[in-house]
Image: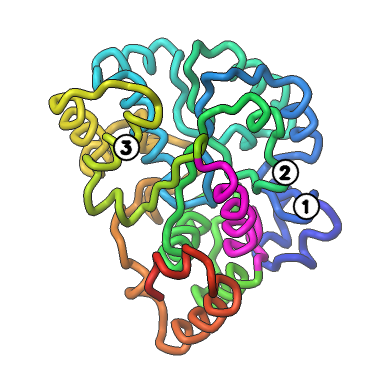
């Protein structure tokens, strides 16, 4: 933990697993990791980079993406998983401080095409991804549900200190950007500006739309990634990626992960839209709406989400 961490967020005051660098807090990501990522990674033109703010449905979308790349052949995908050719979901920047080189080496050993997930903000994003015109998928979710999901994730995750404070205090930290990866608003707006300029190489997925009609977005991904998906393949992918299937699949649900206490909250917790209504008070909702108006007014996202 840096000297500034406690000052920047009371959530992590006693934790050695939280780093403060590049103007934000990180969960186990040392400052030098970014230099390794920029200079040592083998960027490939057929990589698919998956980006989002945490708890936006990234792990779910990661599974959907690989199933699309395998054109709905779930048996072949699961065989690749068992052989280590497809990694369990973990953003590329997350891991122990001592394992930086090992992480990069592991990713470099994977066969193409790779799906590479990350929560790194766009201002720190590897420029090589853009220069090679890699396909990019960006997932966005209503920040109210993100806040609730992040709260429960903090309660169960040891790296994040298994937070035992109140929901009220956590929400204030979230709104002020005093959580790992910083402000949802700053993170999202940083990505959104680039997305508007890169329409040909980036596909935006809204978590809520995927929940409502996953098959349509599977077909969108197939077109975007140049994969022919038969009606049978779309059905197979939708079944594989349903919350019921994901939550009992040990490859995807992090069962047995020593860093999490599933008796508090599972990694794949509910998979629903609108859980924020079970947590926000009327005053918190009004406060959130005021910040939403200030930060997001005039953007396409403002029109998409009803706060």
| Element marked by disc 3 | helix
Label pair 1/3, CB-CB below 8 angstroms: no
In depth, the one of 156 and 237 nearer the eye is 237
Query: Does residue 117 sit above or below 10 in this rendering?
Result: above
Q: CA distance from mark 2 to mark 3?
A: 28 Å
Left or right, 176 with reference to 5: left
Residue holding disc 2: 124
In depth, the one of 12 and 171 nearer the eye is 171
Q: Is residue 196 magenta?
A: yes
Label 2: few (<14), some (14–19) or many (≥20) C-alpha neighbours in 10 Å? few
The label nearer to you, 1 versus 2, is 2
Q: CA distance from mark 1 to mark 3?
A: 38 Å
Numbered marks: total? 3
Spot the residue most to the bottom.
283
Q: Earlier in the sequence, mark 1 or mark 2?
A: 1
Query: Does residue 280 sit above or below 153 in this rendering?
Result: below
Residue holding disc 1: 20
Q: CA distance from mark 1 to mark 2?
A: 14 Å
In depth, the one of 110 and 97 nearer the eye is 110
Q: Earlier in the sequence, mark 1 or mark 3?
A: 1
Residue drawn at x 42%, y 69% as measured from the top left: 303
Q: Earlier in the sequence, mark 2 or mark 3?
A: 2
The label nearer to you, 2 versus 3, is 3
- Residue 57 pos. (x, y %): 40, 47
Which SS type dominates the magenta stretch? helix
Residue holding disc 3: 220
The label nearer to you, 1 versus 3, is 3
Bounds of the magenta segment: 177-199
In depth, the one of 72 and 194 nearer the eye is 194
């Amino acid at each position: 933990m840096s000297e500034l961490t406690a000052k920047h967020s009371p959530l992590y005051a006693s934790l050695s697993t939280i780093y403060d660098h590049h103007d934000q807090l990180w969960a186990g990501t040392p400052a030098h990791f970014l230099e390794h990522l920029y200079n040592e990674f083998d960027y490939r033109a057929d990589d698919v980079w998956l980006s989002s703010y945490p708890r936006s449905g990234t792990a779910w979308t990661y599974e959907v993406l690989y199933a699309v790349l395998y054109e709905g052949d779930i048996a072949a995908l699961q065989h690749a998983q068992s052989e280590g050719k497809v990694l369990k979901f973990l953003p590329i920047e997350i891991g122990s401080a001592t394992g930086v080189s090992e992480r990069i080496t592991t990713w470099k050993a994977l066969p193409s095409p790779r799906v590479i997930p990350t929560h790194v903000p766009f201002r720190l994003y590897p420029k090589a991804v853009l220069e090679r015109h890699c396909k990019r998928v960006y997932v966005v979710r209503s920040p109210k549900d993100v806040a609730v999901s992040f709260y429960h994730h903090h309660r169960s995750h040891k790296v994040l200190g298994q937070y035992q404070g109140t929901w009220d205090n956590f929400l204030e930290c979230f709104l002020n950007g005093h959580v790992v990866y910083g402000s949802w608003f700053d993170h999202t707006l940083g990505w959104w500006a680039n997305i508007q300029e890169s329409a040909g190489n980036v596909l935006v997925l809204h978590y809520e739309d995927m929940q409502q009609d996953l098959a349509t977005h599977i077909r969108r991904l197939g077109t975007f990634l140049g994969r022919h998906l038969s009606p049978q393949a779309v059905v197979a992918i939708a079944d594989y990626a349903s919350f019921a299937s994901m939550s009992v699949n040990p490859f995807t649900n992090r069962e047995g992960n020593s860093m999490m206490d599933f008796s508090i909250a599972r990694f794949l917790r509910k998979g629903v839209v609108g859980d924020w209504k079970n947590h926000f008070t009327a005053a918190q909702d009004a406060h959130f709406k005021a910040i939403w108006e200030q930060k997001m007014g005039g953007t396409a996202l403002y029109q998409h989400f009803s706060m």
